[in-house]
Amino acid sequence: MAKLTGIEIYKHLPKTNCGDCNFPTCMAFAMQVAAKKVGLEQCPHVSAEAKAALSEAQAPPMRTVTLGTGDRALKLGGETVLFRHEEKFHHPTVIAICVQDDLSEDKLAQRIEKINQLQFVRVGQLIGVNAIAVEHTAGETSRFAQTVKLVAERSPLALVLSSTDSQALKAALEICAERRPLLCAATKENFKEFAALAKEAQCPLAVRAATLEELAELTQQVKALGVEDLVLQPEISGLADGLAKLTQLRRLALEKNFRAVGYPVMVSVTSSDPFLETAYAAMFVCKYASLIVLNGAERWQVLPILTVRQNIFTDPQVPNAVEAKLYKVGEPGPHSPVLVTTNFALTYFTVESEVENSRVPSYIAVVDTGGLGVLNAYADDKLTAEAIVKAVKTYGVMEQVAHKKLIIPGLVAVLKGEIEELGGWEVLVGPEEAAGIPAYLRNEWKG
């Protein structure tokens, strides 16, 4: 259904121009509703019939679908922009690793544990794989159900159940329906059986088709059967085809308000080349997959994808910053070095990790630069000699050490003389890159 105009919305309003909605006329209010700047509920006199008739106009252009339950619930979709700089992307791409039901029990248990361990701490945040996709490849219903049972018992991650057999999915749902798995995938051949399963279990359902036209038609047929929480799975052949289809789906949903494809999108990324698989997945994180199923489960394969996701799903208008204060690495004492850096999260955690690698207990005095890195903060006059001296004096760190030496980033060596004049300390110029910190502290520092 096309987006409703202000005139069409106005026809359902009381037309009293009472002003109770905080707009002078019902027409003005209708235009704001059509532009999605206010909600229909802001009119206290709108009838239940009007609310029902206009519910689609009030719905967001892309539906938000929940996978899993409780603390492990994951939100898919619900995006509102094509480009991150316009606002932000809201719900980070779910990364799932697949397991096949033809694995032996020992190998299956090992793979599950390996997937569970795909969790990392980066710039102070825990990032990791979110789900396990169980694939029905052995052909036996009982084998698939047993695999799902073992995965559900041994992993807290969300579940994606992939099979072309409705009976196999039914058997699996008897084991894990309360975990609200994603059922994958309804096609034009089986959508009635799959829709019935999804509706009964109240689980989200993936819909798969070869073309976008077939996908749009199929989602409407499934929705007519009473299933609202859908995930689109377009069949793709290669990177260019996948990029084109996912971009078209996002544009149709957000710019054209084409409700038939206003759902999150999933892709399965498999390649005999593990490097290529990682590259494909990273691209689909950016454009525009809400769920990606991978085959590779090596840490070196997964971490780059998670890093891209962490970077993309941040608010570009809000700097990623840490608290500006004095930090301790190890157990520093009176002869430990004092390093200065900014409160840009990536800068701080990079410096901290390199100080840890040096195994030299140290103090790190973090200056509030509004979340900017060293060079940007210097260029913006937020990392100045005055700011550094003020921060160091506020933290009182020079009263805790005996050497009265301060190490500043090599990129702002020009501040050395001014800091010495203002602070009265000896200023040492450290490495320009954080990678040089371990060698500097081990070989050149003398407290």
Image (cartoon, grey):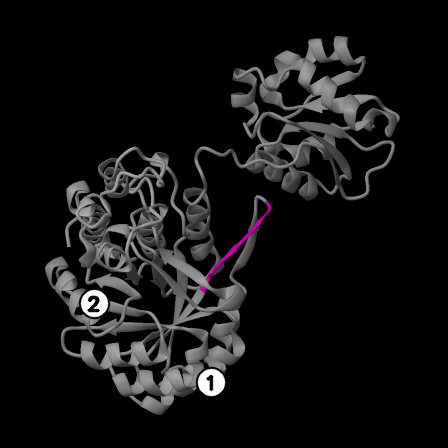
Q: Quadrant of residue 6?
A: top left
Closer to the eye: label 2 or 1: 2
Q: Provide residue 404's location: percent of width, then percent of height.
A: 83, 21
The residue beneath circle 2 is 208
Of the pair 326 and 189, the residue shown nearer to us: 189
Between 350 and 242, the one lying in front of the other is 242
Q: Name which quarter of the figure residue 420 lies in.
A: top right
Residue occupying the point 33% across, 85% down: 170
Classify mark 1: helix, strand or loop: helix
Question: Hey, which quadrant is residue 386 in on the image?
Answer: top right
Front position in the image: 356 or 15: 15
Query: What span is colored magenta in the figure?
Result: 124-130
Residue 233, given in percent of the width and then of the height, sits at 24, 63
339 vs 57: above or below: above
Disc nearer the start of the sequence (2/1) = 1
Q: Quadrant of the N terminus?
A: bottom left
User: Can residue 136 be seen?
Assistant: no
Q: Amino acid at mark 1?
A: Glu
Residue drawn at (31%, 51%) of the image: 284
Q: Amino acid at mark 2?
A: Arg
Which residue is disc 1 drawn over? 105
Distance of label 2 from label 1 (alpha carbons): 30 Å
